[in-house]
Amino acid sequence: MKLKGIPPWPVYSVAAGVLCVLALLSMLALDRMNWQKGEKSYIFTGARVHKAPKVQVKPAPAIVKEKQAEPRAEAVRKPEPKPKPKPPVKEPVRVRPAPAAAAPRSKVALVVDDMGNSLEALDELLGLGEPVTVSVLPYSPHSRETAEIAHRKGLEVLLHLPLESLNNHDSEAGIEGLIHSGMSEAEVRKTMADDLDRVPYIKGVNNHMGSKVTADEALMRIILEPLKEKGLFFLDSRTSGKSVAYAVARNMGIPAESRQVFLDADGNNGLIKERLLELFRLAQKEGRAIGICHPFRETLQTLKENFHLLKDYGLEAVLASELATPRD
């Protein structure tokens, strides 16, 4: 009796045989491929000797590596000579002491007295573009304003202290803040204190007139005591050859200096210029000099036209306080 849909057994036998043959052929093909590559073979083992030598061409990369390693050794050795950049260390031996050894420029200070009567005069002095010291009369109409503007603009301010002279009693009449020889010590101290309070931002004091008072050592000591207390310097205007004011100030330990050249010349512009150049030549010779003038129209015009010449003389314009130090 036959089962429906099931083929007879011989068909299965043929199929199984075909599969076995195919499997065997695959094994042979794989084993031959391994033999050709020089790998392990189970059937073609005897003929493997012919292909093996070809694989030993691999030493070539090792030779290349050795040749590549040589440049690296050279590259590592090259930095060794580089520690010789010592020549630059010799640069500190620069011969630059020459500029440092050069003598400092000589200095000149310009002091303008009788300031406080006109703000226009102050504007002209500011227009010079150089350090200038302005000395302000304590009871002038614009004393405080002049001092404030000058200070704000970088100028130096002094109190222009009115002192009694020998021959100008008529012109002295009515001058407020004047100290004269007939005053008691208490009156001198009171007047001095009032004058100092009238002008702000002062760095020092110089005398207005005063040919009589500056020759009186005892009176000058009373006048100078407040300067010592306040740390101010004194500039002797030298209105008299008999003045002892500078010497007394020095003796009291107060920074002080004296005027060397007086610039005003009764409206003579040519003479004013000559005196200005005299000031410059003296500063060149002595290393320092102070000139005093007044804000007259001719003097201001001459300064405007010629003060810049100080550069041609190799001079530096400074404030008067910078020169109120002991000389070498």
Image (spheres, rainbow, N blue to C red):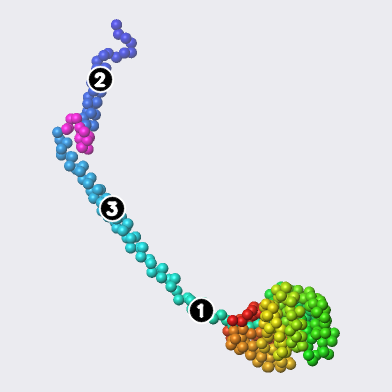
Q: Marks 2 and 3, how far apart in space?
A: 62 Å
Q: Which residue is mark 1?
A: 101
Occupied quadrant, residue 260: bottom right
Mark whose residue sits in front, 2 or 3: 3
Choose top left, top right, bottom left or bottom right for residue 277.
Answer: bottom right
Marks 1 and 3 sit apart, C-alpha to C-alpha, by: 59 Å
Could you say where residue 112 lies in the image, as x and y percent from the top left?
71, 83
Of circles 1 and 3, which is in front?
1
Sequence order check: which comes first, mark 2 or mark 3? 2
Residue type for callout 2: Ala
Q: Position of residue 93 (x, y in %)?
A: 43, 73
Q: Mark 3 — residue?
A: 69
Left or right for 32, reference 134: left
Counting residues from the start of the chain, the first of labels 1 and 3 encountered is: 3
Real-space CA distance between mark 1 and mark 2, rounded to the nearest whole angstrom: 116 Å
Residue lying at 22% horizontally and 46% vertically, measured from the top left: 59
Residue 28 vertical placement versus 242 (above, below): above
* Residue 41 shown in magenta: yes
Read off the magenta span.
32-45
Disc 2: which residue = 16
User: What x and y, as percent, mark residue 279?
Assistant: 64, 88
- Residue at image coords 48%, 76%: 97
**Total of numbered circles in the picture?**
3
In this view of the protein, which residue sits in the foreground, 52 or 148? Answer: 148
Instruction: Name the secondary structure under disc 1.
Output: helix
**Element on which disc 3 rests:** helix
Kind of residue at disc 3: Ala
Q: Could you say which quadrant of the image residue 105 lies in?
A: bottom right
Q: Closer to us: mark 1 or mark 2? A: 1
Q: Does residue 16 appear in the picture of this structure?
A: yes
